[in-house]
Image (cartoon, grey):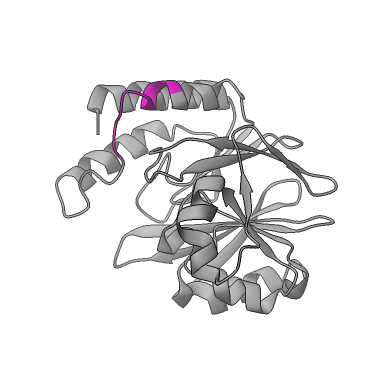
Amino acid sequence: MTNISEIAPDVFRISTFFPGFNLQFCQFLVRGEEPLLYHTGMRGLFPVVKDAVATLIDPAKLRWIGFSHFEADECGALNEWMAAAPNALPVCSTVGKMVSVDDFIGSDKTKGMIDNEVLETGSHRFRFLATPQLPHCWEAGFMYEENNGVLFCSDLFHQSGDSTPLTTNDVVGPARKTFIEYQAGPLADYMPYTKKTDAEIKRLAALNPKVIAAMHGSSFEGNGEQALNEYAAMRKELEL
């Protein structure tokens, strides 16, 4: 079952729980003059995500499709979305555009962004932060919606289970538990710890986001700076 929740003004979390994986897959629609979808989900999720988006906007009016890095749950349904929304363009890192995305869509129309570049979509401003290897992949990066203080954090704060859409409770503890569980199975080492990891997470903390929009698990509302600094300490402790 796919659920829709407004986690900030005109920012909607679309979540589908897969019991077999004990995991939620979340996409985020930012409604406005130029609507933006962050994460597409896998190709198999496209019909249900499109139906969910259709309750919020006309899917054909989608303008931007953002994601952190090139992976099925991030952008697997990208081509399906571009067919459904003829004016929609992918937006990701310049590296992602060059090494994967343009080839995947068969076009050079991807908007590749450099570190600290801002995408203005009318009432929303999205700042792009390049973070190679965080959460993973050379082309990785994050988007921060400055007007509402929402950080779209991809796999950071990954929590297993069928979580509540938005919480003010601790999300670092559940993320720590998930890291340890994953390290004991076939998905071990999926989020590398490098000499830059701590500084990159603390750079995100300095934004002091009001909402941290996680792809897997609850989004967090509250002191984003503190949550990210605690997450950085947890990652440093585990070095996973």
The picture quadrant where one finds residue 127 is: top right
Vertical placement of residue 41 versus 215, above or below: below
**Split into 4 quadrants, where in the image is the C terminus?**
top left
How many labels sit on residues?
A: 0
- Which sits in the foreground, 219 or 88? 88
Residue 152 in sight here: no
* Residue 17 location (% of width, % of height): 43, 64
> Residue 148 vs residue 96: left or right?
right
Q: Main secondary structure of the magenta part?
A: loop
Vertical placement of residue 91 versus 147, above or below: below
Residue 169 in sight here: yes
Vertical placement of residue 7 versus 144, above or below: below
- Which sits in the foreground, 134 or 49? 134
Vertical placement of residue 12 versus 198, above or below: below
Instruction: Tell which residue pokes out farthest to the left in this image.
Output: 184
The residue depicted at 75 percent of the width and 69 percent of the height is 87
* Residue 80 location (% of width, % of height): 57, 76
The picture quadrant where one finds residue 119 is: top right
* Residue 209 location (% of width, % of height): 62, 30
> Residue 41 vs residue 59: left or right?
left
- Residue 14 within the magenta-colored segment of the rendering: no
The residue depicted at 64 percent of the width and 72 percent of the height is 82
Write down the region rendered in magenta. Answer: 192-199
* Residue 233 location (% of width, % of height): 35, 21
The residue depicted at 61 percent of the width and 24 percent of the height is 208
